[in-house]
Image: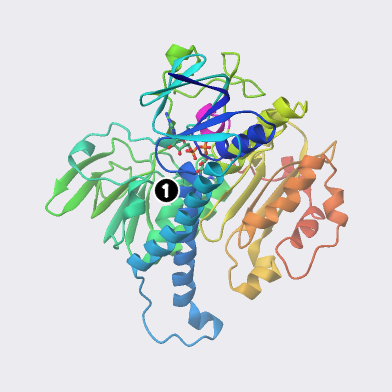
Amino acid sequence: MTNTYDAIIIGTGQAGPFLAQRLAGAGMKVAIIERKLFGGTCVNTGCIPTKTMVASAYAAHLARRAADFGVVNPGPVSVDMKLVKSRKDAISGESRTGVESWLRGMTNCTVYRGHGRFESSREVSVGSERLTADRIFINVGGRAVVPQMPGLEGVPYLTNSSIMDVDFLPRHLIIVGGGYIGLEFAQMYRRFGSEVTIIETASHLAQHEDEDVSNAIREILEREDIHIRLNASCIGFSKHGEDILAHVDCVTGDPEVSGSHVLMAVGRRPNTDDLGLTEAGVAVDKRGYIIVDDHLHTSVPGIWALGDCNGKGAFTHTAFNDAEIVGANLLDSDPRKVSDRITAYALYIDPPLGRAGWTEAEVRKSGRRALIGRRPMTKVRRAVEKGETQGFMKIIVDAQTHEILGAAILGTGGDEAIHSILDVMYAKAPYTVIQRAVHIHPTVSELIPTMLGELRPLSDVAGAAQ
Ligand SMILES: Cc1cc2nc3c(=O)[nH]c(=O)nc-3n(C[C@H](O)[C@H](O)[C@H](O)COP(=O)(O)OP(=O)(O)OC[C@H]3O[C@@H](n4cnc5c(N)ncnc54)[C@H](O)[C@@H]3O)c2cc1C
């Protein structure tokens, strides 16, 4: 028997549930399918659990630094990983059950448990059930890439998902991948007490960032005795007694790193390989991402793709925005589109990096006339008072229009302070609006107007390459 709906949503990540609420609220009969954990990556194996663990790691770090603040430290600080995990499980679990009960209690919405697969462009199977609708929304997210590396199949390794079950302290965690996910795990495990080595094939960490940002990140991590092996080539693995040997073949340093555990953090891939996309006629690119237009239509009318699986974003806020775009177009006659979005994200090491818009390297490459302002966190009173002066902030504006092109705040509170810049970018207002705004003292944000008062031609400043 086939169950007929107005809309089918596959996946309950960051776009699906919100879209279900919008469509069901508009009176549509909606089916939503989840094969595993309600809430998807962010809730279960991504943002929420990692930021919860980052908070535990920060507490350990501050406890070790207690004497710097005049607080008497009774002795060595240690971390109980079982307690760290149970705090993380409680916070993440609350969100997961919250998403599930929200969906199950939603009027006009039916929840299906199981793997959804297209049988045709209008039909989806879930186990023995057949669902049909004229509108189908794909929100299947992604998972960790596990690349083919010599010897990897012969050694145990962790991913962002399986590391969530770890309730002990790895003696020496080898992290393959110096991107955002790898860096967050690196600092957090170091602060928990593990020895940590990051192995990265590129010549610098967080390789999409400007070189000055990347170098500052490296200094922050190395100050905490995290080992960093860049330019690693021919990465391979073998067992050596209880240990795992990672062969790194780097230009400098030992050709091997010996550790107790390996975390693979080399990127993500979309969950589109077992979705029946061929049966539906939905086109994907060569990496498996679903091809969509600016309004998130796929190549098949009546099918949309939202979130990480469309390759237009790799964040919770971009997935959620996808749902806003689709909802606005379908229900409000409001032609919102993906290209309205300004790139923005944070890297949650401590201190965090908040980013908005273009990098300096991208602006230089564009050939535009631009102005740049830069300020070290040592010259931000709030950072000095908090004893957290690592990092810097910089901003780049168009010399002609005075619109802000991009900014990076690597420093305490950088993940929050970046929003005062981002909002002015969305307003397409000139930078002078922030420069003349009176910000609160003492905050990190109050130095943004000051930095904007010290702009110099980008061409006069030595380049921060990417
Ligand atoms: C370690 C880590 C940390 C992160 N930290 C941040 C952060 O701090 N900030 C941020 O913005 N982003 C962060 N991200 C990224 C963020 O988690 C993702 O961008 C976001 O979850 C994407 O949401 P989504 O809706 O596309 O899909 P997902 O959240 O991945 O959800 C997809 C859902 O679809 C289900 N599904 C898949 N296939 C099927 C099928 N065939 N049938 C039925 N159900 C299916 C899955 O089980 C899953 O529940 C992090 C990611 C990782 C891995």
Q: Is residue 418 left or right of residue 241?
A: right
Q: Is residue 386 left or right of residue 269?
A: right
Q: Is residue 157 above or below residue 339?
A: below
Identify the magenta region: 306-312
* Residue type, label 1: Gly
Which image quarter holds the N terminus?
A: top left
Q: Going 57% across and 63% down the picture, which residue do you hit? A: 390
Q: What crowding class fits label 1: few (fewer than 14 Cα within 10 Å), some (14-19), or many (20 or more)?
A: many
Does the numbered disc 1 mark a residue whose Cβ is under 8 Å from ligand 1?
no
Q: Nearer the viewer, residue 235 or 416?
A: 416
Which image quarter holds the C terminus?
A: top right
Q: Nearer the viewer, residue 50 or 1?
A: 1
Residue 94 forms part of the magenta stretch: no
Q: Nearer the viewer, residue 365 or 112?
A: 112
Q: Is residue 313 above or below residue 217?
A: above
Where is residue 65? Give x, y as percent: 48, 76
Extreme front residue here? 1
Residue 308 forms part of the magenta stretch: yes
The quadrant in which residue 114 appears is top left
The residue beneath circle 1 is: 182
Q: Is residue 425 left or right of residue 21?
A: right
The quadrant in which residue 307 appears is top right
Q: Going 54% across and 42% down the picture, which residue do you hit? A: 103
Extreme left residue here? 241
Q: How is the image coloured?
A: rainbow
Where is residue 134? Give x, y as percent: 58, 17
Q: Is residue 3 visible?
A: yes
Q: Is residue 205 visible?
A: no
Where is residue 37? Give x, y as percent: 42, 43
Q: Is residue 85 left or right of residue 28?
A: left
